[in-house]
């Protein structure tokens, strides 16, 4: 029995479905068009995953991640993150719990994730899974070209969003260069959800190093890997002059959100000229 799927289906709350459907833009022509909901809030999903993740197999995750229901796909991703995070660790002793996740490797989790990106098809599914899994996997690796390829050549905006949001783990470990480089790739992207994601990650980078973000906004080559060319297996990313005036307004607004009011006003005024 797929305990994760069974527990999630038992938590369905039809009264919540209309609100969630509106929030995740499932109407005709919207980015989440056609998605189906059970009416389960994220804290409830997290509680189910905490209870069940040790008992899931890849077959169970396959069944869940390909579900028509948004919350079941999220549960699969959150469970996968738990399996990944605990891979290689000695499992805790729990009476009556089948440790089906025991023996799974981190690499297997990454391979599963990358082979199922077609089902990671909304911003919350991306944002709650990619950086604790892909970002963490790549943190100690020299070659991070996977993220550059997703940002450049992703088949959907969700794959492209994975490319930038995965760098959150690098930022939290004081590594900002990849965020700036991938932001260059997505600087002129047409979709609002990419503008917001890039601006968000730039803001987080700026919280670590405001001077680095300012230099990137102003087009200083030193903030793109020293010579402006990527060195981690990615194709070259050349810095452009005065990115702040080139980038979409939403992206800029998110990026400078933590700047003092006077500085924000100056950047936005220059953008409007």
Image (tube, helix red, strand yellow):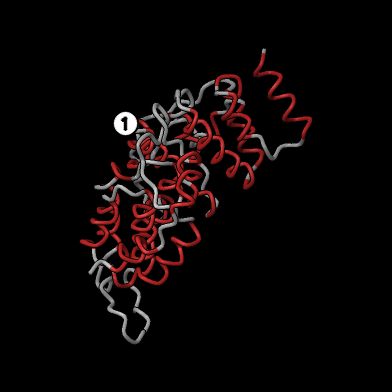
The furthest residue to the right: 262
Compared across the picture, whether 71 is left or right of 254 comes to: left
Percent position of residue 70, x then y:
37, 48
Residue at 31% x, 31% y is 153
Percent position of residue 261, x then y:
77, 33
The furthest residue to the top: 273
| Count of numbered circles in the view | 1
Residue at 44% x, 56% y is 13
Residue at label 1?
153
Percent position of residue 173, x then y:
52, 54
Pick whichever, 198 or 207, lies toward us. 198
Residue at 33% x, 72% y is 54
Res 9 → quadrant: bottom left
Q: In the figure, 84 relative to 205: above or below?
A: below
Element class at badge 1:
helix
Pick whichever, 143 or 90, lies toward us. 90
Query: On the rendered image, what quadrant is the N terminus found in?
Result: bottom left
Res 45 → quadrant: bottom left
The furthest residue to the front: 15
Residue at 40% x, 40% y is 163
The furthest residue to the left: 59
Compared across the picture, whether 117 is left or right of 208 comes to: left
Percent position of residue 156, x then y:
33, 33
Tag 1: Cα neighbours inside 10 Å, few (<14), some, or many (≥20)?
few
Pick whichever, 180 or 228, lies toward us. 180
Query: On the rendered image, what quadrant is the C terminus found in?
Result: top right
Q: In the figure, 262 relative to 20: above or below?
A: above
């Amino acid at each position: 029995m797929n305990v994760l799927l069974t527990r999630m289906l038992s938590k369905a709350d039809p009264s919540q479905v209309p609100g969630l459907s509106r929030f995740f833009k499932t109407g005709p022509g919207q980015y989440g068009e056609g998605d189906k909901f059970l009416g389960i809030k994220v804290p409830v999903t997290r509680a189910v995953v905490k209870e069940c993740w040790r008992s899931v197999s890849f077959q169970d995750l396959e069944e869940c991640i390909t579900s028509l229901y948004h919350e079941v796909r999220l549960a699969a991703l959150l469970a996968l993150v738990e399996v990944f995070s605990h891979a290689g660790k000695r499992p805790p002793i729990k009476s009556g719990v089948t440790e089906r996740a025991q023996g799974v490797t981190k690499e297997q989790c990454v391979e599963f994730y990358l082979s199922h990106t077609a089902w990671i098809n909304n911003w919350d599914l991306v944002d709650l899974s990619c950086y604790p899994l892909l970002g963490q996997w790549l943190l100690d690796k020299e070659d991070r070209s996977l993220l550059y390829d997703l940002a450049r050549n992703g088949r959907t905006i969700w794959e492209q969003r994975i490319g930038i949001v995965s760098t959150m783990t690098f930022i939290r470990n004081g590594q900002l260069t990849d965020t700036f480089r991938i932001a260059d790739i997505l600087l002129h992207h047409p979709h609002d959800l990419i503008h917001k994601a890039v601006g968000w990650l730039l803001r987080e980078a700026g919280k670590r190093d405001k001077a680095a973000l300012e230099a990137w906004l102003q087009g200083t080559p030193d903030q793109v890997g020293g010579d402006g060319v990527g060195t981690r297996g990615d194709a070259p990313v050349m810095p452009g002059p005065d990115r702040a005036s080139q980038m979409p307004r939403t992206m800029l607004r998110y990026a400078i959100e933590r700047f003092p009011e006077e500085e924000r006003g100056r950047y936005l005024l220059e953008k409007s000229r």
